[in-house]
Image (cartoon, rainbow, N blue to C red):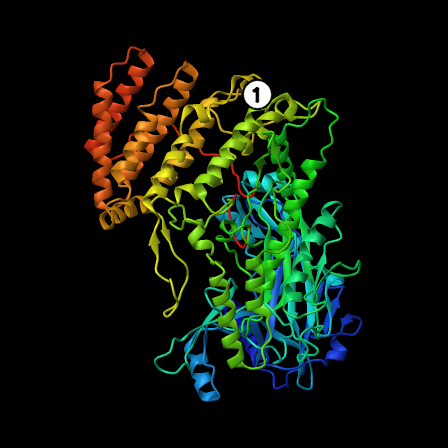
Amino acid sequence: MKQVSYRLLWGSIVLLWSCMLLAAAPKNTAPTPPKSIEQFTKGMQKHSGFFDIYWDSKKGKVFVEIKAFDEEFLYAHFLKTGVGSNDLGLDRGQLAPTKIVRFMRFGPKVLLMQSNQDYRAETDNPAEALAVENAFAQSTLWGGTVQALTGDTVLVDMTDFLTRDSHGIVKRLKSAKQGTYKLDAKRSAVHGDASKSFDDNTEFEAVLTFQGSEPGNHISSVTPTPELLTVRTRHSFIRLPDAGYQSRDFDPRSGGIYLSYLDYATPLGESMQKQLVIRHRLQKKHPERAISDPIEPIVYYLDPGTPEPVRSALLDGARWWAEGFERLGFSNAFQVKMLPEDADPLDIRYNVIQWVHRSTRGWSYGYSIVDPRTGEILKGHVTLGSLRVRQDMLIAQGLLSPFKTGDESTDVIEQMALARLRQLSAHEIGHTLGLIHNFYASSKDRASVMDYPHPLVKLNAAGEVDLSDAYAVGLGDWDKVSLAYLYTEYANSSQEKAGLDAILDKAAADGHVFIADRDARMQGGSHPNAHLWDNGADAVSGLEQVLAVRQKALSQFGLHSIKPGQPLFKLEQLLVPIYLFHRYQVEAAVKLIAGVDYRYASRGEAQAENSLVNADRQRAALKILMRTIQADELAIDESILKLLLPPPEGSFRHREHFKNRTGLNFDALSAAEAAARHTTSLLLNPQRVSRLIEHQARQSDMPSLQEVISTLIDSTWKAKWPNPYQTEIQRGINWVVLQELMQLAASDSVSPQARAITFQQLQKLATYLKKSKNKDAVADAVAQQAIRDIKQFMEDRKVPKQPKPFTMPPGSPIGSHSYDE
């Protein structure tokens, strides 16, 4: 029985195994051919246009019909909705870098590939161009499989491409230390009803949700449930423009924004680097006429969500550019309108000015969608931060303290803020027309809206604060130069070269100089006329004027600075921009010290050499800078201090307030320290200090580093004041100076000579303090501690641990930066 059972069991196993092998054997049947596009998309919503797209509302998928492969088009993507935090920079309407892409098919696979525009061969030889193309990597942005097929036209599912983290939000939040997030596919979807197609562009929209843990303060302050962040993104497939656009070479003197690439077909002996200005296509209907309408005007549209009176101010400022184009012989070439109700601000067909809200004030921007091949601007997109105008009104309010009875008109305050908005509108549009900042312009009678303007506030004949000329009106002379370089039409290339050179030569003869961001933004910068937020041809007299206005504003600051019924705590925030009203003019004045005057130039130009700033001018700058670190300038009057009450319930100090060491109470000493640190750190910048040594060696009358440091010490540690309050303010300033001197000596960036001189000056300070006879116990304690710190620093070359230094509250824009402001 057992033997029979074993045989039966073995037979069953063999039979089962045979069945399994038979089932696993390949079937000799032909693969099912893909459905036609018509069959596959039956019942779906179709949008016809540049790309025909289909929305499957049942499955939540978007399908794209591809009729031709290996044909380039432009891909752009935006944030449709923002996060609302200036610190994170994820704003509504934010544009990511645009890309030249094309679909490629490999059997059943379809890839979306990005061309490499940085390396090219501009040649009639196809093999030469292909050799360069094959030499450098490309990028594949997406891959999918053919879903349906009709002839040579295929259908692909691009849902996963549209619902990915295209804007790099996860990376941005991580780098900002706002938590660890990941895209949640279950809570993300294509917004099919918002996806559309037009003749020259196809638009897709998606809703993305990011789930995270340990959210930071910034993301928590703007998101209802900080662990779940939802935004919408926009993707645009854009037809590349035709060949009718004529590229224009960039000249570093022009003030234009450029794109750059290497051309490997360049003849030997010539530079391979090519630079083209970016600009809109603008051509006359009748080029033979001196004045003609354009074939197609440049039209900008304002966000209808902009309220009055802001709306009118932005429209007024934007229209300033019309004058510039009229001077070039274009009538009706630049227009500004309200965006139609049915228009989408992110649609490639509209140049748009968006009014964008954030939880905190921040920068405004001028972006452009540009054809990377030629530099042609296809869409200008301006982002204007809505809280900027409110800060400008606070500044005007603090300067005037106008509420003597409480029912005074605030029209003067509002008009100053609206004047700033007009300038800001023109400024950001200027970027989208192809213009870069010119930070020299403020020294030449406010010659450009592309500078950063500090309000030009004066004291009138009666000694009262006057805001009537706070901001300039209209384009400046430099704007007209730069616009002429970009948009003047010429009959041929030889006329163009001669004409453009003539524009820049005349500008130079008229005294115009172009100095851009890098030169002006460096804390160790040397150009005596390239600054942000300054006024006037002479930084010293500019600082004198600003200090006089500051003094007047502080003298009347108090109960009249706020409206009746407002909490007194409001005064503290209002005080900050007035107390620090001189901060930017300090940056301008300090650049005179070890300053170098220069401009961008080429061989053959006259007066192209740089020159050192005159020694007397440097010493005048040093003298007035010392005023900004002395107790009588930085001590807040007792009448103001009595009114600076702690925040009431429901109110809090934030970064717009001075930091303090005194709990809920205002800290007058820390405010003075923060202001003094600003001046001192700029003055003792390692680059500036190293230039001082070089310049004095080249020209013996120039200020030496020894002179600068000894002047600094004489003005602080050796200064005497008549009352205990000023004396204590000065002691805090003195500690700032000592800390900055030790930081300088310990810096890896400073020259060996500068380090040696700074050590010597510190030793001299210690010797002076040892010899000083201090009857005051606090003065003696401070002196002894300073001596110990200097001794310790001399021994181990490490800055002794100090109380945490306080910095000023953010000022720009009146902080981070970009294009732009």
Horizontal arrangement in the rendering, residue 499 relative to residue 33 (left or right): left
Residue 80 locus on image (x, y percent): 67, 56
Q: Which residue is at the front of the view, 129 or 788?
A: 788
Q: Is residue 367 visible?
A: no
Q: Is residue 240 visible?
A: yes
Residue at x-position 45% and y-position 26%: 633
Badge count: 1
- Is 510 above or below relative to 791? below
Q: In this view, which residue lies farthest toward the left?
A: 795
Residue at x-position 21% and y-position 45%: 752
Horizontal arrangement in the rendering, residue 529 relative to residue 27 (left or right): left
Amino acid type at circle 1 is Leu
- Is 172 above or below relative to 1? above
Residue at x-position 42% and y-position 19%: 726
Residue that carries the numbered disc 1 in the rendered image: 644
- Is 496 above or below relative to 582? below
Horizontal arrangement in the rendering, residue 598 relative to residue 704 (left or right): right
Residue 95 locus on image (x, y percent): 60, 59
Residue 106 locus on image (x, y percent): 55, 81
- Is 534 above or below relative to 250? above
Residue 592 locus on image (x, y percent): 38, 45
